[in-house]
Amino acid sequence: MLLLAACATGRPAPPATTASAELDVLTDRLGPPMTNSSGTCPSPGKHVDQLHPTTLPRSSWELAWTETAEGQLAEATVTPDGALWALRGTGPAQWPVQWTGSSWKKLPTFPLGKDPTVRLGAASADKAWVFVESAPPMSPEAPPATYTVSTWDGRAWRSEQVDLGAPPARGEQPAAQGAWVLLGDRSMRWSGTAWQTAPLHSYSYKLSGSTDEPWAIASSDPDAEQGQIQLSRWTDRGWQAIPLPDGMLLPPGAEAPYPNRPWTRIAGVARTGPEEFWVASTYSWVEHEQEDVTMSRSVVTRNVAGRWSCWWGPVDRPDPFVDVVPDGRGGLWAATGSGMFWHLSDGRWTRERAPVGKGVPAITDLAASPGGEIYALGGIGSKRWAQDIRPALWRLKP
């Protein structure tokens, strides 16, 4: 059971009221799979770098905003009218904010108590959703968590109970971006007047792309049966399964105690042409030295009219991608968690460090605006993995 609530600016809002509402069915079927997907992706030697980026001495990005208060920015969403939304805070204490062009506007406190905020989505400057974990399980045998959704509509607080059926059995948290929400193996889209539902191929944890063309990303399960659907794209006929390329095997010389159990974690998808899109991922496996050690390397895959090709990064310098967006000119920008921006343009990779002044950057999300600006959200710490991180926003102007 989810609780759908709405909030507003201006004078103090009246107490939330509760009423029941029903969901519309967008579709009750899955879309047809991409049947012409082909191509193999053999992993080269561990030290081979097929990306070989050129590191630029100066960054084209600017540090648009930061302040001394602790916390970070995450869950970036840019709406079709250009509004940038994010969650700000640290740990379970997060709250929704909206970018004004020079600072972050904090909305009036939404009446959902002290439960941890976990996801944010938005359809416009006056319509956004915040998912809150309202009943975390106390033990593995306990029922799954339920979630409350607080909705900003620019006018007043309003509460509706929306029955989505049984919560996810595997304990997945919801994912939200734009006007879409994922909850386990189900999805919802805001039509402008109501929530509409559609089934997913797999239990999915992340949304990428845009409201018009969202991509649902599922976890890679080493124990899953062959043919697990890890990537799906929304079409007018439902969610379309996108088979990843074959042959993503361990690199030569890998001495793995579990050779048939590598896994791939997809960071995001960027469409760069009518029949072309890119997927940024991290490929991992376990090797055994004196103890089991997880090894990882970046892999970027390109699909053109259904055919895959792949480029691998080296194992000795793992710096996983966290997100990827189109650059608006046929290329793309990707970001790593350590604050490195990668740019693909005309078939050539370059990379540049996020400017921080003093400290170490940490990137959580990228977001591309309709006007051509690209934003990177995260924080700046005194050192990598530092606890004293402060929120930061980077911006790339067109």
Image (cartoon, rainbow, N blue to C red):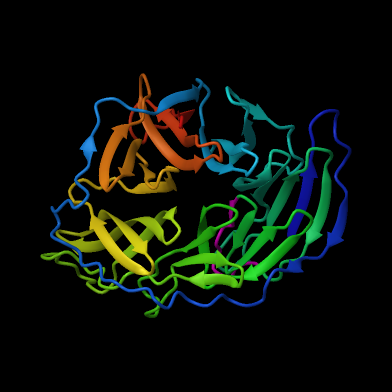
Assign the N terminus to one quadrant of the image: bottom right
User: Residue at horizontal 52%, vertical 78%?
Assistant: 32
On the image, the x and y values in percent for residue 178 come to 61, 50
Say whether residue 231 is visible.
Answer: yes
Which of the two residues, 304 or 150, is positioned nearer the viewer here? 304
The answer to whether 4 appears left or right of 88 in the picture is right
Figure quadrant of residue 284: bottom left
On the image, the x and y values in percent for residue 146 come to 67, 59
On the image, the x and y values in percent for residue 314 come to 19, 51
Which of the two residues, 33 or 70, is positioned nearer the viewer here? 33
User: Residue at horizontal 43%, vertical 55%?
Assistant: 273
Does the magenta segment cover residue 170?
Answer: yes
The answer to whether 352 appears left or right of 201 in the picture is left
Figure quadrant of residue 84: top right
Q: How many marks?
A: 0
Say whether residue 1 is visible.
Answer: no
Magenta stretch secondary structure, dominant: loop
Does the magenta segment cover residue 183?
Answer: no
Q: Residue furthest left?
A: 253
User: Residue at horizontal 51%, vertical 21%?
Assistant: 67
On the image, the x and y values in percent for residue 239 come to 56, 70
The answer to whether 189 appears left or right of 298 in the picture is right
In the rendered image of this protein, does residue 383 appear above or below residue 27? above
Which of the two residues, 179 or 6, is positioned nearer the viewer here? 179
Residue segment shown in magenta: 167-177
